Image (cartoon, coloured by chain):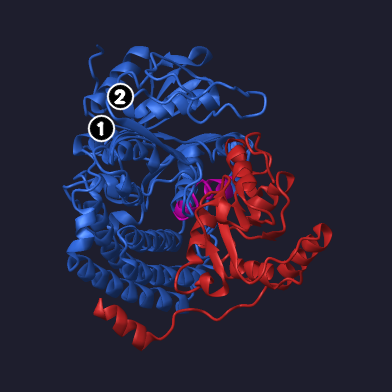
Chain colours: A blue, B red
Amino acid sequence: MTAPLSLVEAMAGQDVDPDGYARLEVGDAVWEALAAGCAAGRHDLSALWADEGLVRMALSDSERALRAIVSLRAEAGVYPSVARHHAPALRLERAMRDLRGTQPVGLPDPRPWLDHGRWPGRESGARYEFLPVDGEGLHQVPVGPIHASIIEPGHFRFTANGETVVRLEERLGYVHKGVEGLLAGADLVRGARLVGRLSGDSTVAYAWAFAHAVEAALGWPVPPRALLLRAIMAELERMAHHIGDVGAICNDASVIAVHAQCALQREDVLATAQACFGHRLMMDRIVPGGVAADLSPEGIGAVRNLIGRLEATRAEIRRVYDSMPSLQDRTVTTGIAAPELVRQYAAGGFVGRAAGRAFDARKTFAYAPYGTLDFALKTRATSDVDARLMVRIDEIEESVRMTSQLLDRLTPGAIRREPPAMVAGEGAALVEAFRGDVFVSVRLGTDGRLARVHARDASWFQWPLLEAAIEGNIIADFPICNKSFNCSYSGHDL
Amino acid sequence: MRSFLRDAILKGMATVPSPGAGRVALEEVARALGERARRRLGRSLSIRMVDAGSCNGCELEINALSNPVYDVERFGLKFVASPRHADVLLVTGPVTWNMREALLRAYDAMPAPKWVVGVGDCAADCGVFAGSPVVVGPLSGILPVDLHVRGCPPTPLDLVKGLLALIEAPG
């Protein structure tokens, strides 16, 4: 067994780059020791990707606010598997093998992940074998890839005894579009558009992460007003999804009146976004160097009025929720994700915070302008549907407070700066999307084009927890559990 | 909950008036019908939505169609779970190779006569994902498309205008 090495030890004496990440080059032994360090809970695995003969790991130590990108030279793609030590790396390594041909030695599960045997030139008739489940009276329920409602596609294989789920196994990859392939060689304008469409519900967060990474790589300063506008857009995006999903969770418990109220409030946010920034989801509004849409004085008033209505709705929804035992009966103790697992997977967003994991990229690795804002990082401990819902209701309140502070600080000024001279380089960024932190790493070539972009959605570390959370629950509660996670298929499938 | 009733009385109806059928959409549907001589499907359409590789932006806006502001059921438009109950297949995304078979199976499961509507720029021409080797689209190369509703993503009102054209097009 490899002795675990802590990130703080590995980073001793190492300079930290302007993007907040130290960059380390290591050999096989240190690589494995750091992987074992993830498993021992010394630090978290944040991302894992391949880049021109290298395999790279982003690691973070929240307590000490340390981050590093660790690189290992992988001859012909061969390197020691991280998942052999640390299970949360498993799907990342399976996907990387499918997409980049890397060969993780000791990979505990050699099945393909994103490769379904359908891609031209790589067709395979091999059957995908789900994990075996043995026991008396068990039956399987296959669901998807097409689901009953208007959501993204993915396959869920339930094994149940009567109504009780004994195992859920996910199979994803149906919406794999090859985004990282398209990004290689793209210019910055196209890059921003592509990254902004990795997961449409987090378009603001992704565009911000991409812009931030590019700006770090080029030393491209961003005007203060643009930073404030970015945060206003990011909080609008967060509030729109939080209020919408709170309603959708209640809808899964058949409380349609709450769903309708939340849907109206969500529309209010999107209509304001359209009026202020020219796009309901605010796609393509954050660009490297600043933002592409300014907020007029009328717009400032519109956002201010909006957050007043949002806070009133939030408080009322909370009162109604608290007054309905029949609703709480569906959410309390339903879909518990064991807090040890949540910590092991370093699950971000409300999935993590509902299990007591006090991590929020806006706080833990604060990026401008969040470092100077007054807001609370609230957690819950019960890690059930109720806790995830409560965290989101709490976050709306904090986002309202933040947005108010951001509006107060807006002073006239430029919203975008022209690009500096293009140089080769790299940068990385971690941005808090509504469902959790998204990581984007960018490497630029000398021609000003993107040589390699890697994006890791929060969902990578949340999807596996959904499998664990549904165990012992009844199949009929899957929709409400699933909605309480609301993982992205597109952001995961790439 | 009483506050919801109070709101409903004080704030009045949230639902927006019908925007009417989009002119461009009407022309496209009329053309599709003329060429393939399909009969009109009447005032009520059941819709099965399939995501064939979207970024989920289109799904957000399609979901909004059922909220109290757009309320498309008032026009006789209803989302159904089974393709066997559907008149219209509403497709988003550039069509990935990994979703192609599921999409075709959903179409084959629908009873005739049936219509296909492509939603979003991706369904029209693969959008920003055009050129990817793991994308098989655009949709029109895989299924006969009667109507495209463009946009990235199209707004709910654009979607309403497009879908109304299906109902109002001369048969």
Q: Which of A367 and B135 is in front in this view?
A: B135
Q: What is the span of residues highlighted in magenta in the rendered image? A: A191-204
Residue drawn 29% across the image and 34% down it: A345
Q: Is the magenta stretch mostly helix, strand or loop?
A: helix
The residue tagged with tag 2: helix, strand or loop?
A: loop
Does residue B153 appear left or right of residue A107 in this picture? right
Q: Based on the displayed image, in which of its 4 quarters is residue B121 positioned?
A: bottom right
Circle 1: residue type: Gln
Question: Which residue carries the number 2 mark?
Answer: A86
Question: Which residue carries the number 1 mark?
Answer: A344
Q: Nearer the viewer, residue A397 or A475?
A: A475
Q: Which chain carries label 1?
A: A
Q: Residue furthest front?
A: A137
Residue A78 at x, y percent in the picture: 47, 14
Q: Which residue lies furthest to the bottom in this view?
A: B10
Q: Point out the tag, 1 or 2, that comes first from the N-terminus.
A: 2
